[in-house]
């Protein structure tokens, strides 16, 4: 079945550091890929998405590229801020016709001033 | 544009009591989803509605959980009776249609004592 694997956290960085959160997936067919962010006590907010191979999703300085050859969708940001502290979830759209999203376990990011 | 609205935001009940969660999706969104998010995990789909029809409820524990979306807009998820293991965050999401991007509400955090 389809699945998503994320790097375990927490990831602790200093402000202005470079961020990479790894995400790899297993899927039949061609899923869409997503990154969602969850701030403390809140729901999931869509951060970015990519719908086909080699697409790059970007938003608020974050970006991720859909790499079919390595089945990856790593999240990157060149310079993190304290306000980026949150839990980041990688997800894919199930390709079996259910339309459900399959999520990774989340990676907690903590940015220190 | 208003996002997905959920209420209550927090609920504390004793085991064996009933509880209900309410969701109002984004206007015009025909597809509505209920997800369960356990602590430290990604969300998992419980049920998906296309308008008022439940088209995927295979992950819904039907002995104690029920859901409805009577007029194809708002939805209610009910647990009766609640068990300790039901303590989690219940997330509602909506999309224009199946396969379209899902937008999540803030969730209802349930604690069963």
Image (cartoon, helix red, strand yellow):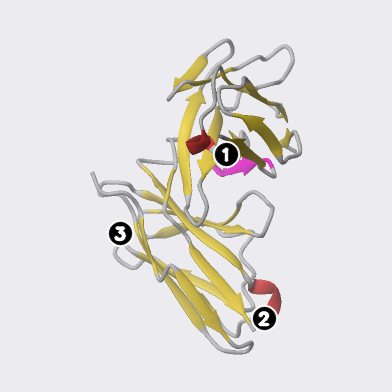
Magenta stretch mostly in which secondary structure? loop
Q: Is residue A58 above or below residue A112?
A: above
Sort mark 3 into few (<14), some (14-19) or many (20+) by Cα contacts within 10 Å.
Answer: many
Q: Position of residue B37 (x, y in %)?
A: 61, 57
Res A68 seen here:
yes
Callout 1: SS: loop
| Circles 1 and 3 on the same subunit | no
- Quadrant of the drawing holding the C terminus of chain B: bottom right
Report the residue marked by disc 3.
B73
Residue lying farthest to the front in this orientation: A113
Which chain does the numbered disc 1 sit on? A
Report the residue marked by disc 2.
B83
Q: Measure how far apart labels 3 and 2 are at the Cα level.
A: 28 Å
Q: Position of residue A84 (x, y in %)?
A: 51, 35
Callout 3: SS: loop
Q: Quadrant of residue A98?
A: top right
Q: Position of residue B23 (x, y in %)?
A: 38, 63
Report the residue marked by disc 1.
A97
Residue nearer the viewer, A28 or B35: B35
Q: Residue A47: say if magenta.
A: no
Q: Is residue B49 left or right of residue A8?
A: left
- Quadrant of the drawing holding the N terminus of chain B: top left
Residue A26, disc:
none
Magenta-tinted stretch: A97-104
Which chain does the numbered disc 2 sit on? B
């Amino acid at each position: 079945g389809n699945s998503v694997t994320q790097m375990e956290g927490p990831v602790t960085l200093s402000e202005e550091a470079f961020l990479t959160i790894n995400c790899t997936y297993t899927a039949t067919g061609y899923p869409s890929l997503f990154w969602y962010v969850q701030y403390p006590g809140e729901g999931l907010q869509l951060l970015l998405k990519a719908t086909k191979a080699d697409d790059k999703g970007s938003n608020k300085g974050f970006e991720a590229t859909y790499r079919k050859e390595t089945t990856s969708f790593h999240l990157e940001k060149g310079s993190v801020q304290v306000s980026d502290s949150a839990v980041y979830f990688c997800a894919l759209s199930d390709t079996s016709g259910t339309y459900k999203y399959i999520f990774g376990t989340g990676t907690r990011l903590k940015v220190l001033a | 544009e208003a996002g997905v609205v959920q209420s209550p935001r927090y609920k504390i009940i004793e085991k064996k009591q009933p509880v209900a969660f309410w969701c109002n999706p984004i206007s015009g969104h025909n597809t509505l989803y209920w997800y369960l998010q356990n602590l430290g995990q990604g969300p998992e789909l419980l049920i998906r509605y296309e308008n008022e029809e439940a088209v995927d409820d295979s992950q819904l524990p039907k002995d104690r959980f029920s859901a409805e979306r009577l007029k194809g807009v708002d939805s209610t998820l009910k647990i009766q009776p609640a068990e300790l293991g039901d303590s989690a965050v219940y997330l509602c999401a909506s999309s224009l249609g199946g396969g379209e991007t899902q937008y999540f509400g803030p969730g209802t955090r349930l604690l069963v004592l």
